[in-house]
Amino acid sequence: MIATEPALRHATIPDHAGVGLKPEHYRHILETLPDIGFFEVHAENYMGAGGPPHRYLTHVRESYPLSLHGVGLSIGADQPLDNEHLKRLAALIARYQPALFSEHLAWSTHETAYYDDLLPVPYTLECLSRVCEHIDQVQSTLHRQMLLENPSTYLAFAESTFSEADFIAEVARRTGCGLLLDVNNVQVASTNQLWNSYRYIDDYPLRHVQEIHLGGNTPEADEKGRPLLIDTHDRPVDANVWQLYAHAIGRLGPVPTLIEWDAKLPDWPELEAEAKRAEAVMFAHSGERQERKRASTG
């Protein structure tokens, strides 16, 4: 069980850009308190009882709102959720009072095996029921809403009877969960599966979106020479993702937006510049949305 700390006041996340909190940047952040909207951490990195990670995270949390992003619940797995993992997650949330908690529409466990990858699920009625049951269990245990993130995918299941956007919309309707729209994942999946990424955004249940992710991807080619994108989070946000983000913000208005950069980390100024670019896009295109709305009602 995670040791308790003095209670922190629950904070909300402003409609600004944030970045993932990495140990390489701990000291710079605490010494300079940069103008960043929020920080996000992977829950599983802080499930130990103490040590330097918790010391730094506690100090960061005293100055910034926090988003907690899970990677290990295995929401889509064809087996029960790990109750011990849920307990550790509940203790972490009680300790840090994050404004948002999110997980992936994916699975990563089978029996006693844990995989490094977030694997896709078929979009069927059977899977829908299982995912909804798991989300209901998570939200009941944590006593709070969970955000569900759309996946980055490389293949589709022949047995799927829903589109991805329709499947996610039905999950949100049945469970009351919120959504995390990962725009890079949309670009990756759309390129790999020959979808129209803009139509995907237009079909997505945007009214449930409470957070957006942006990240880098690596362009490759499959065995037939067709474009293949790999969701790597190890470089700046791609130009196509920036354009798709502008389209999404034009539909949504300002939404807390995270720059995901998890490998080959840059120095702090480059990461901060990505966040500032997200804010510039956010407010430029949300302003256009308001202008269109006023014109349509004028």
Image: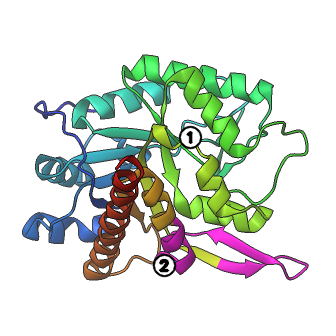
Mark 1, secondary structure of its residue: loop
Q: Does residue 223 appear to the left or right of 191 in the view shown? A: right
- Residue 128 in sight in this render: yes
Q: Which residue is mark 1?
A: 205
Sooner in the amino-acid sequence: mark 1 or mark 2: 1
The amino acid beneath tag 1 is: Pro
Q: Quadrant of the N terminus?
A: top left
Q: Does residue 194 appear to the left or right of 138 in the view shown? A: right
Depth check, mark 1 against mark 2: the one in front is 1
Depicted 169 relative to depicted 59: above or below = above
Percent across and percent down for residue 264 are 45, 78
Image mark count: 2
In space, the residues marked 1 and 2 are separated at their CA atoms by 29 Å
Q: Which residues are magenta?
A: 219-244
Mark 2, secondary structure of its residue: loop
Nearer to us in this view, 188 or 39 = 188
